Image (cartoon, rainbow, N blue to C red):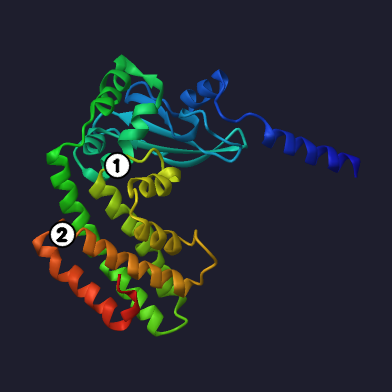
Amino acid sequence: MQTLVFVVLKIINDIMADHSCLSALDIDELIHRFDQSDIVQALILMGSYARNEAGPCSDIDLVRFVVKGAKVSDDGTHLFQNRTLITICTVDENDYEKWFTDPYEATKWISGLRVARALVDRNGFFTNGLQTRAHDFVWNDEMQSRANIEASRRMVDWCEEANKGLEGLRRSNDNGRLLNACHGLSWGLSEVIQIHRGILVSSDNNAFDEIELALGDNERMIDLRRVTFGITGINTLRQRVLAGLQFFVLLAEQMFDVWQEIDHEMIQHTVEKIHHYHPNTSV
């Protein structure tokens, strides 16, 4: 019994230890495991470990830059020292150039690149190249024009989830449709806002709060979004979908001038359908 207690206490102590940064030995082990000098241009640390904010359950986020056309087989999730998950993705020029030209990719990557730490950086490929470009990145008129087109296209994509929500509500207990609708009407519509407003999120974990901050004093949209995500109050799945449909209608109305001509009909049709089946969702 005493042995069991000792083991449990040791596990708890290990968990409570400082995991906010990696030691030099940890970094050496990561480099040995994931570097290939003939094809790797840089290996960088991103996420909470790069920001020295990691906790005992945080994973290690690595991005490996390789020469164009190089092939590797160890992308994915790994276990590090029997205690920490590693996620590694490998990119080449075809991938990372999109981070500076595609609005959605820019919102996902630019902020993280600015604070990333290079573990391997051959000839300054990362610090003097991509990281400098990230610091210099400006969301200009050309990028905003692309963002408007992309946001409009994604709003059309989420019309399907709005319709699933309507059908799920009609069938009363169709949890599958309601869950799909909840995802689209929460994360999906949030991505529309993220793209349109050029919100360079610092991480997936911070995206919700950073998008809400960008909404400023738009209290009605903030409240509906919170209910849809299940953050505010104790709401049923049905209530969350109803809030999500109101969120869709409000976003459609407030961003009316952004929607592309080819997309107007689909978005407006969905809004009218929501009003028809649930008149109380008018905003």
- Pointer 1 residue: 107
Q: Residue at x 34, y 48 (%)?
A: 216
Identify the element where label 1 is drawn: helix
Residue 110 image-quadrant placement:
top left
Please tell me whether residue 6 is drawn above or below residue 219 in the rendered image.
above
Tell me the quarter of the image containing the C terminus: bottom left
* Residue 15 in the figure: left or right of residue 103: right
Q: Residue at x 68, y 35 (%)?
A: 16
Precedes in sequence: disc 2 or disc 1 = 1
Q: Residues within 10 Å of mark 1 (few under 14, many from 20)?
A: many
Please tell me whether residue 233 is drawn above or below residue 146 in the rendered image.
below
Residue 227 image-quadrant placement:
bottom left
- Pointer 2 residue: 259
Whole-percent x, y for residue 84 in the image: 58, 37
Q: Residue furthest bottom?
A: 171
Identify the element where label 2 is drawn: loop
Pick whichever, 134 or 242, lies toward us: 242
Pick whichever, 65 or 276, lies toward us: 276
Q: Residue at x 41, y 71 (%)?
A: 241
Amino acid type, residue under disc 1 in the picture: Thr
Amino acid type, residue under disc 2 in the picture: Trp
Q: CA distance from mark 2 to mark 1?
A: 20 Å
